[in-house]
Amino acid sequence: MVDLRQFEKDFDTVSAALKRRGIDEKILEKVKVLFEEKKAVQKRLEAAQAEQNSKSRLFGQYKREGKDVTELQREVAENKERIAALNEELRLLEEKLFELAATIPNIPDPDVPDGEDEEDNVEIKRVLEPKTFSFRPKEHWELAERNGWIDFERGVKIAKSRFSALRYEGARLERALINYMLDFNRDRGFEEVYVPFMANAESLFATGQLPKFADDLFKVEGEELYLIPTAEVPVTNLFRDEILKKEDLPLRLTAYTPCFRKEAGSAGRDTRGMIRQHQFDKVELVCITAPEESDRVFEEMVACASDLLTSLGLPHRHMLLCAGDMGFSAARTVDLEVWLPGQGKYREISSISNTRDFQARRAKIRFKEEKKNRLVHTLNGSSLAVGRTLIAIMENYQQADGSILIPEVLRPYL
């Protein structure tokens, strides 16, 4: 959540930064009006409290002088009621500000490029050269049909569109990838954790999915539980409402979970194949750091995911996302896009974000330093989207006859 104290203190600067994200100016105007109303109420409250203190001091003087205190008692009682009413008015205004702030995205880092969507993202570098094929490379759904690895029709029969079933070597390769990714991350110093695949509303609020993105979540009927859209939610919330020891930071965590998304707003996009599913596997990286370490840790996370792709022999590129294309909680994001020769384009396979103290403020994750509690910085990133990695292997390792080679690093897992 944005820091309301910073917002109120320097409204114009914060508003200008948020406008880079394409925020509706009507929301900013509402915030400004509420700040002005709050300031006016605080001024009246301070005056009433000063008057109360002044009148309270008169009791002793009146008694010494033998004066009647009846009128003074009445004035003090009336002023006490006025103070109570002003405190309630202030509480309601602060509640409205909190509810509004909960829908406002994070402030982008100053060096994040301006832009509205993926067309304005900036390429940082490319890693590995795409292979040149002596034949027309097939897309993954063509290869799936030839090898029997992905059963789209039966997936739809079991659930609905955007669900699929993996079979034969496809199912085994999915499991091999999960194990390989977890081992790779563990060797890089990440602690492996296993977490619930459901989360409550408090957890989803903490990481920024609620209230703004409720339409993209699968809710469990009759329960205040949701299927998780990413492991970022349960892993970050392991430490919700806790005060950590600075010497324990940074915390580096990795987890495998299935992820569930309604894909609200994606109608007509990637309807064929397994690029955009309602259920998919992902291995996640989550880091919790002191603020002064978060930039270094961010670069370590990007390098970890990129090196994982390199170890699989998958060409990819690093993209710095523009302000308008970043996720709700992110202050800075680098996407890794893998080359898919069947499609002839790069597609996102990992997204690494530094949320600064945005999630920590919502989740109340702090650390103690010199007897003071400070907000941590939280970071998260895919390492990797497993289904898309499977697709990338199918397309990059396909042979002229439609068969698929297995990357050497995965062979021990099979």
Image: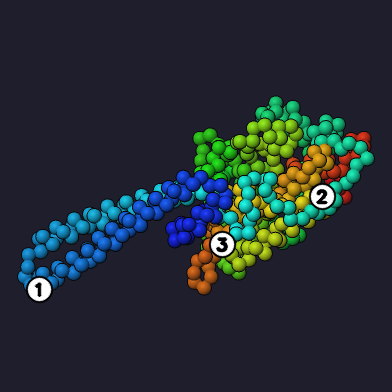
Per the image, label 2 sits on a secondary structure element best described as: loop
Which label was assigned to residue 315? 2
Q: Position of residue 205 (x, y in %)?
A: 52, 48
**Residue count near mark 3 (Cα–Cα under 10 Å), binned few <14, some 14–19, many ≥20:** many
Give the residue displayed 82% in from the left and 36% down from the top: 139
**Residue count near mark 1 (Cα–Cα under 10 Å), binned few <14, some 14–19, many ≥20:** few
- Identity, as a three-letter code, of the amino acid under mark 3: Val
Q: Is residue 226 left or right of residue 94?
A: right
Question: Considering depth in this image, is 128 or 91 the residue closer to the camera?
Answer: 128
- Up-down relation of residue 402 to residue 242 (above or below): above
The residue that label 3 is drawn on is 376
| CA distance separating discs 3 and 2 | 34 Å
- Identity, as a three-letter code, of the amino acid under mark 2: Pro
Per the image, label 3 sits on a secondary structure element best described as: loop
The answer to whether residue 185 is seen in the rendering is no
The answer to whether residue 138 is seen in the rendering is yes
Q: How many marks?
A: 3
Q: Earlier in the sequence, mark 3 or mark 1?
A: 1
Q: Earlier in the sequence, mark 1 or mark 2?
A: 1
Q: Is residue 165 left or right of residue 216?
A: right
- Up-down relation of residue 312 to residue 398 (above or below): below
Q: Position of residue 256 (x, y in %)?
A: 69, 48
